[in-house]
Image (tube, helix red, strand yellow):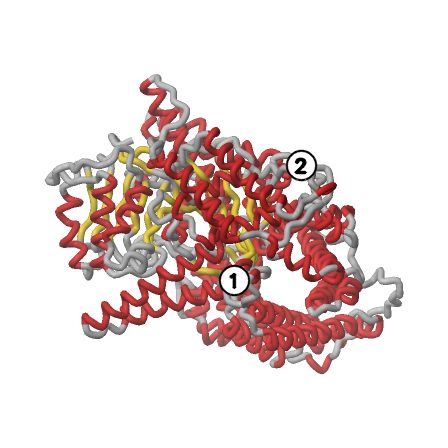
């Protein structure tokens, strides 16, 4: 329909002003008829199109505009931008200035929520210009003020994270000014006098004789008397006004005027709010209440509060809860009641329930971080079971990760089930051949709907139901749904960052084990020494982006070979140092929480635990005497001690010191007797702990039979997913992969079980867990389709041709059907080209596949997820995950072909993928794709700038015969 409208619009440009029903009378004049009748066959159709064009355009505009707003709610920023641009293109030719202004404001909001400040400001100014070109309803002016206020408020938050506090406050002042002006406009247009004037039409604005004649013959409308009880107020305007008060209250609270801010937030609260509006209101109210409690605690004992704030906190911290508060916790909670904390927690959980299905992703993610902070405050009071609190925090942190991708997955599954499971455009679609599913089953051509298709459909239906159930899932069901299904040799580690407080939350999950959650203040170690260096999140991100930008510039402007290599090696060292600093400053002595498990004997763990407990008693004995000689033994969580054990004999002094401060803080939290930092012999205790770790490490090194089969899967939030965590010193030589959320991990576990179940049915065998295995006879490759990667083609052409059972394309552009067939009908798909191949097959076509092969994307930035500010990051790699690929190897940034080709060849060799001409080499059995990638990083000349770029999205996958 849109193409037809555009066609008629282009074909009849000269007639637009003559047949526009808004400008002339209904009859078409003779001149128009003459022009139309020149086209004998198309005359009637063109005339009909012109008569309907304006109403069709209006409907198309509204449709695209509403679609854009819905995509914003889902978090799909690329789709939202497309819809708004389409709406703009439709409405601009007819110069509907009010509508143009409205779309430009939506685009401006999209830009500032992506942290694109310049682009957003330009669009806001354009919107205001269009408003000034014509007379529009003053509500549109208020919306422009609201948009400008939101722009300045978010810019202020951005300045705060960069440490630019002066400009932050200036932006807040501008935002308050715009909000107040918007409130004044809304207050005026809601007055009785203004509403009364609307009943009388200003005839001076009429443009045509027909409209003037129509008004002159119309009866004067009776004057309506408005009541002053608010019953005649427009709800939409009232809601907009309430929203403005809420925004003003939040900014005032951030400026320290909490009481005034609370009054504004609760001012004119509407009783008939929608679920989403209510969620936003409760969330802002909760955050201000948290600020109020924080202010109370700081005024009560600032030094003690800052000490607690800058300390590591663990859930669970103790195996057994002691029903007694320490003096330290009592000092901090005197002015804050348990009821206040419970009320905040109730508010924040209600926000999650109200907004989970369709609320803004950033709202839910911020609510989850607030819940974790409040729960930890509550847990420090020792009157609750800490393991339950760990599950609650984990539930909210994980369920709000990658929300946009999960919503798109749910929509994609519905689409897959509503369409035939066929991949070949050359075959007739089932819905055309057979009107109903029952007819398909009864038809003799069963090849179109065989047992394989039915099994696949059943699996997709099960998956669809799982996603639908997530909206009603509770934290009591979280363990069973996501954690108990994990294979015994996998450890899942989830990382989240609170960019407002510079705190990191790490959760470790194992099969049928209570989650272990750590809160790690990023600058805690520098704060202890009274220094202001450390490494903040913004500092690390700035350094990382600077390295990648410099690398890109060097590749674009190559100099002499010697200078080029020198510059690249310097960047390699910089990236290595950055990863070293991230591990040391952020993780410190707690890096073991990310590391793969070892075969820890329970007796050895118990022995290590006793040694650590004795060290604390030694600290206490130094200051106890007489009637104070009674000691209470701490029962630190065993999983924490296991994470310390993973450090081994190579633990640095700085790491051990970090652990000591944590243990002292834990002791002080749960005991009346306090140990001061200056009262312990730090150097001696460091030596004692290193000795305990070394003794245990010697034992572990002789019992590593199954250590090589351990895998770590990282679940990274949007603020940390761009960093190469797999190349941290503590993880660099371990099998580590990543995924956006636990939901995607569950999907791949279900897929593996589904595939293996079919194999077991054929073999009449049953096993508890079998890894995902690839048939090496089902491989498809695309090599150098752009024909400008000659080195890569020379390196791999003979290799791929000689793999038994492989098929593919070399040196030409594939059709999108060939690409889709390779993904859907093979078990391994290899792409040697630029990017992720999006120019050959669009992401929408990929994500709607009902199955997808294990995929190797060797192009530059093929695995990069682009940051979207408040929105979840986006990238084509998500399309492969939505299609159900068990694992994808892809690059986080641009790489050079020569060094990366060396990596690829080594990866194939380690994995056991050999051509017929190659002699199989002896290698460790059971080598997964993840392990092969880890081993291949060693062969790169630039082990960090190139070696850290390739990562695995997904689960361990094995070649047939190696598992």
- Foreground mark, 1 or 2? 2
For the question of whether residue 753 can be seen, the reply is: yes
Q: CA distance from mark 1 to mark 2?
A: 41 Å
Q: Residue furthest front?
A: 626
Q: Residue furthest left?
A: 917
Q: Which of 645/104 is in front? A: 645
Q: Residue furthest bottom?
A: 204
Count residues near mark 1 (Cα–Cα under 10 Å), then give few for <14, some for 14-19, many for 20+: some
Q: Which of 839/562 is in front? A: 562
Residue at mark 1: 869
Query: Which image quarter holds the C terminus?
Result: top left
Q: Helix or strand or loop: what does disc 1 sit on?
A: loop
**Residue displayed at 19% across by 71% down:** 562
Residue 902 is situated, as x and y percent measured from the top left of the image, at: 21, 53
Among the 4 quarters of the image, the one containing residue 450 = top left
Q: Which of 169/823 is in front? A: 169
Q: Which of 847/415 is in front? A: 847
Q: Is residue 65 above or below residue 18?
A: above
Q: Is residue 782 above or below residue 915?
A: below
User: Would residue 557 be found to the left or right of residue 455 on screen?
Assistant: left
Among the 4 quarters of the image, the one containing residue 557 = bottom left
Count residues near mark 2 (Cα–Cα under 10 Å), then give few for <14, some for 14-19, many for 20+: some
For the question of whether residue 137 can be seen, the reply is: no
Among the 4 quarters of the image, the one containing residue 428 = top left
**Residue displayed at 27% across by 35% down:** 959
**Residue displayed at 41% across by 24% down:** 768
Residue at mark 2: 321
Q: Helix or strand or loop: what does disc 2 sit on?
A: loop
**Residue displayed at 89% across by 64% down:** 227
């Amino acid at each position: 329909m849109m193409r037809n409208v555009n066609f008629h619009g282009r074909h009849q440009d000269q007639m637009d002003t003559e047949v526009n029903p808004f400008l002339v009378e209904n009859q078409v004049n003779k001149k128009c008829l003459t022009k139309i009748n020149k086209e004998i066959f198309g005359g009637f159709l063109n005339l009909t199109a012109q008569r309907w064009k304006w109403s069709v355009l209006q409907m198309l505009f509204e449709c695209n505009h509403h679609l854009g707003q819905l995509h914003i709610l889902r978090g799909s920023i690329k789709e939202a931008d497309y819809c708004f641009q389409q709406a703009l293109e439709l409405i601009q030719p007819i110069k509907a200035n009010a509508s143009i202004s409205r779309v430009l404001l939506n685009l401006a909001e999209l830009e500032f929520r992506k942290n694109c400040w310049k682009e957003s400001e330009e669009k806001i100014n354009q919107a205001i210009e269009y408003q000034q070109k014509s007379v529009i309803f003053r509500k549109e002016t208020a919306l422009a003020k609201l948009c400008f206020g939101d722009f300045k408020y978010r810019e202020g938050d951005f300045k705060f994270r960069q440490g630019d506090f002066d400009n932050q406050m200036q932006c807040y002042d501008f935002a308050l000014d715009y909000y107040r002006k918007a409130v004044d406009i809304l207050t005026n247009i809601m007055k009785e006098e203004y509403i009364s004037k609307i009943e009388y039409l200003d005839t001076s604005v009429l443009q045509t004789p027909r409209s003037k004649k129509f008004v002159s013959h119309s009866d004067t409308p009776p004057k309506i008397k408005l009541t002053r009880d608010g019953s005649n107020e427009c709800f939409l305007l009232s809601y907009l006004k309430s929203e403005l008060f809420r925004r003003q209250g939040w900014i005032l609270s951030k400026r320290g005027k909490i009481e005034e801010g609370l009054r504004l937030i609760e001012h004119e609260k509407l009783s008939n709010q929608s679920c989403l509006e209510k969620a936003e209101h409760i969330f802002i109210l909760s955050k201000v209440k948290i600020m109020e409690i924080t202010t109370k605690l700081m005024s009560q004992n600032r030094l003690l509060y800052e000490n607690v704030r800058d300390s590591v906190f663990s859930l669970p911290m103790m195996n057994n809860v002691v029903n007694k508060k320490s003096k330290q916790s009592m000092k901090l909670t005197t002015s804050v009641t348990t009821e206040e904390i419970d009320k905040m927690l109730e508010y924040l959980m209600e926000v999650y329930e109200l907004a989970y299905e369709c609320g803004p992703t950033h709202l839910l993610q911020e609510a989850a971080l607030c819940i974790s902070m409040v729960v930890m405050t509550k847990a420090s009071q020792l009157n609750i079971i800490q393991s339950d609190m760990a599950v609650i925090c984990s539930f909210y942190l994980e369920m709000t990760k990658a929300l946009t991708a999960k919503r798109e997955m749910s929509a994609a599954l519905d689409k897959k089930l509503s369409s035939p499971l066929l991949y070949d455009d050359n075959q007739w679609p089932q819905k055309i051949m057979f009107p109903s599913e029952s007819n398909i089953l009864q038809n003799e051509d069963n090849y179109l709907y065989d047992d394989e298709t039915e099994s696949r459909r059943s699996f997709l239906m099960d998956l669809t139901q799982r996603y639908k159930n997530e909206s009603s899932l509770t934290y009591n069901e979280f363990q069973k749904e996501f954690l108990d299904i994990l294979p015994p040799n996998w450890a899942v580690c989830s990382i989240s960052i609170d960019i407002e407080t510079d705190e990191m939350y790490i959760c470790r999950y194992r099969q049928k084990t209570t989650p272990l959650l750590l809160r790690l203040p990023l600058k805690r170690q520098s704060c202890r020494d009274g220094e202001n260096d450390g490494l903040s999140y913004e500092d690390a991100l700035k350094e990382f982006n600077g390295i990648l930008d410099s690398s890109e510039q060097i590749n674009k402007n190559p100099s002499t070979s010697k200078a080029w290599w020198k510059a690249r090696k310097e960047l390699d060292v910089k990236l290595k140092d950055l990863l070293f600093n991230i591990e040391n400053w952020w993780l410190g002595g707690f890096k073991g929480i990310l590391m793969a498990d070892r075969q820890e004997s329970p007796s050895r763990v118990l022995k290590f635990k006793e040694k650590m407990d004795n060290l604390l008693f030694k600290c206490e004995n130094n200051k106890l005497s007489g009637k104070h000689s009674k000691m209470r033994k701490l029962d630190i969580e065993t999983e924490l001690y296991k994470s310390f054990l993973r450090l081994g004999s190579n633990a640095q002094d700085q790491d051990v010191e970090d652990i000591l401060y944590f243990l002292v803080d834990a002791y002080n939290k749960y005991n009346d007797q306090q140990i001061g930092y200056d009262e312990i012999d730090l150097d001696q205790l460091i030596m004692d702990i290193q000795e305990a770790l070394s003794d245990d490490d010697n034992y572990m090194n002789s019992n590593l039979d199954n250590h090589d089969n351990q895998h770590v899967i990282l679940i990274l939030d949007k603020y940390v997913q761009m960093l190469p965590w797999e190349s941290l010193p503590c993880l660099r030589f371990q099998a580590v992969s990543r995924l956006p959320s636990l939901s995607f991990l569950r999907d791949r576990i279900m897929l593996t079980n589904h595939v293996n179940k079919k194999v077991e049915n054929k073999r009449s065998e049953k096993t508890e867990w079998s890894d995902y295995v690839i048939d090496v006879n089902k491989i498809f490759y695309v090599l150098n389709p752009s024909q400008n990667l000659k080195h890569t083609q020379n390196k791999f052409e003979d290799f791929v041709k000689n793999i038994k059972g492989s098929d593919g394309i070399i040196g030409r552009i594939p059709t999108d059907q060939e690409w889709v067939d390779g993904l859907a009908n093979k078990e391994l798909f290899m792409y040697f080209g630029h990017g992720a191949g999006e120019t050959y097959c669009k992401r929408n076509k990929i994500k709607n596949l009902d199955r997808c092969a294990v995929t190797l994307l060797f192009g530059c930035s093929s695995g990069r997820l682009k940051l979207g500010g408040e929105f979840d990051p986006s990238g084509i790699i998500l399309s492969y995950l939505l299609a159900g690929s068990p694992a994808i190897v892809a690059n986080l940034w641009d790489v050079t072909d020569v060094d990366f080709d060396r990596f690829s060849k080594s990866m194939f060799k380690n994995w056991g993928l050999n051509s017929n001409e190659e002699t199989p080499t002896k290698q460790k059995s059971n080598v997964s794709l993840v392990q092969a990638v880890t081993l291949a990083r060693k062969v790169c000349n630039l082990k960090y700038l190139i070696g850290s770029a390739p990562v695995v999205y997904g689960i361990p996958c094995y070649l047939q015969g190696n598992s």
